[in-house]
Image: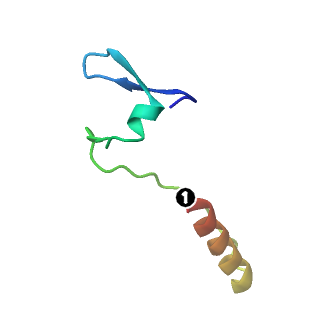
């Protein structure tokens, strides 16, 4: 998406340029070709870490993900 136009890539790799002024009045459909995806992150916390710090870390992680 650019300032004045949006570029769509067709299944055969043809690029289609549409003015944003036109797209603002149309609906756009998005078809997913891949299944749901996720990533995992593994980390360790020291056993002596206070529960308050773990709670703060959890809150910060949620905020980052949102």
Q: Which residue is depicted at the point 62% across and 61% down?
A: 64
Number of marks present in the image shown: 1
Q: How far from the left and from the top, in percent, is residue 12?
A: 25, 16
- Residue 25 vs residue 13, the one in the foreground: 25
- Does any portion of residue 50 appear in the rendered image? no
- Does any portion of residue 2 appear in the rendered image? yes
Q: Secondary structure at mark 1?
A: loop
Q: How far from the left and from the top, in percent, is residue 21?
A: 46, 33
Residue 7: quadrant of the picture: top left
Above or below residue 45? Residue 42 is: above
Residue 59: quadrant of the picture: bottom right
Q: Which residue is depicted at the point 53% across and 56% down?
A: 41
- Residue 27 vs residue 58, the one in the foreground: 27
Say whether residue 13 is left or right of residue 66.
left
The crowd level at tag 1 (other Cα within 10 Å; few <14, some 14-19, many 20+) is few
- Residue 15 vs residue 39, the one in the foreground: 15
Residue 17: quadrant of the picture: top left
Q: How far from the left and from the top, in percent, is residue 47?
A: 68, 78
In the rendered image, the quadrant that contains the C terminus is bottom right
Say whether residue 47 is left or right of residue 14.
right
Above or below residue 62? Residue 22 is: above
Above or below residue 59? Residue 32 is: above
Say whether residue 8 is left or right of residue 6.
left
Above or below residue 24? Residue 17 is: above
Q: Which residue is depicted at the point 55% across and 28% down?
A: 2
Say whether residue 63 is left or right of residue 52.
left
Residue linked to disc 1: 42
């Amino acid at each position: 998406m650019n300032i004045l136009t949006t570029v769509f890539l067709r299944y055969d790799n043809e690029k289609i340029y549409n003015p944003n002024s036109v797209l603002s009045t149309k609906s756009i459909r998005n078809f997913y070709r891949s299944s749901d995806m996720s990533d995992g992150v593994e980390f360790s916390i020291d056993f002596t870490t206070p529960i308050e710090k773990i709670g703060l870390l959890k809150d910060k992680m949620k905020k980052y993900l949102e």
